[in-house]
Image (cartoon, rainbow, N blue to C red):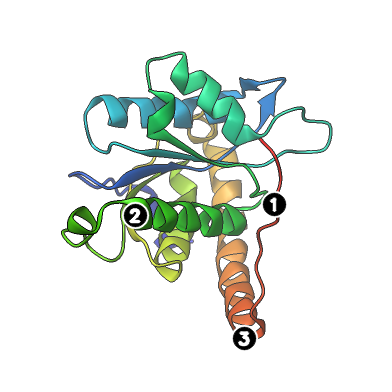
Amino acid sequence: MAVIFGWSRRAAEGHADAIVVLGAAQYGGRPSPVLRARLDHALALWKSDRATRVVLTGGRRPGDLISEAAAGRRYLVRRGVPTQSILLEPAGRTSLASMEGAAALLKAWRDSLPVAVRDTMPTRPSVLLVSDPFHMLRLDVLARLHGLRPLPSPTRTSPISANRAVAIEYMLRESIALPTDVALMLWLAITGGSVSAPTTP
């Protein structure tokens, strides 16, 4: 857990090809306080020209009318982010599935660029990872395993971070989730499977 805590304090500088925002709950299209904190942080990064693309992840929970990603898009568009600057990954219901989908979206985006532009870019897209601090180590590992170059950029305004006991509980969960996700990825690599399933926004 000490390593997870150490990673939670990191925040990268510089620019990236995209900002990847991990989903959290939304209610009737309105982001929860946790999701709103992540979106506000991504908005600040975008306004600071840290990246030109924002990838919003997060699927639907039972009973949801829209996905977390779609709710995030609505929130950012209302605050000035152009729709064409946003890529949606509305299928992922776990961090692993969301990162797999985000990596596929960014690969497709890179492949759509003119060859002359593509040849000037690194093979592995760089991404500013936006989520709660406790999430950073696992997201870094998952991003690397999916061929991305991760740059941690945790939000500091989440209600989870404001409650020390809750933050510690989430870090304990991460100490289990990280090796579980890595083991699952190894299994999927062997079997040729995927954690993502198609869905609608």
Q: CA distance from mark 2 to mark 1?
A: 21 Å
In which quarter of the view is residue 35 placed?
top right
Secondary structure under the numbered disc 1 in the rendered image: loop
Residue 50, position as x, y percentages in the image: 23, 37
Residue 72 figure quarter: top right
- Write down the residue under mark 3: 190
Residue 177 in the figure: left or right of residue 20: right
Taking the image as shown, residue 52 lies to the left or right of residue 38, namely: left
Residue type for callout 1: Pro
Could you tell me which residue is drawn at 43 percent across and 55 percent down? 108
**Amino acid residing under circle 3:** Ile
The answer, for residue 5, to whether it is visible in the render is no
In whole angstroms, how far apart are the C-alphas of marks 3 and 2?
Answer: 27 Å
Q: What residue does disc 2 label?
A: 110
Q: Residue at x 40, y 30 (%)?
A: 84
Residue 112 badge? none
State the image coordinates of residue 49 (x, y, percent, origin top left): 21, 31
The residues bearing labels 3 and 1 have C-alpha atoms spaced at a distance of 22 Å
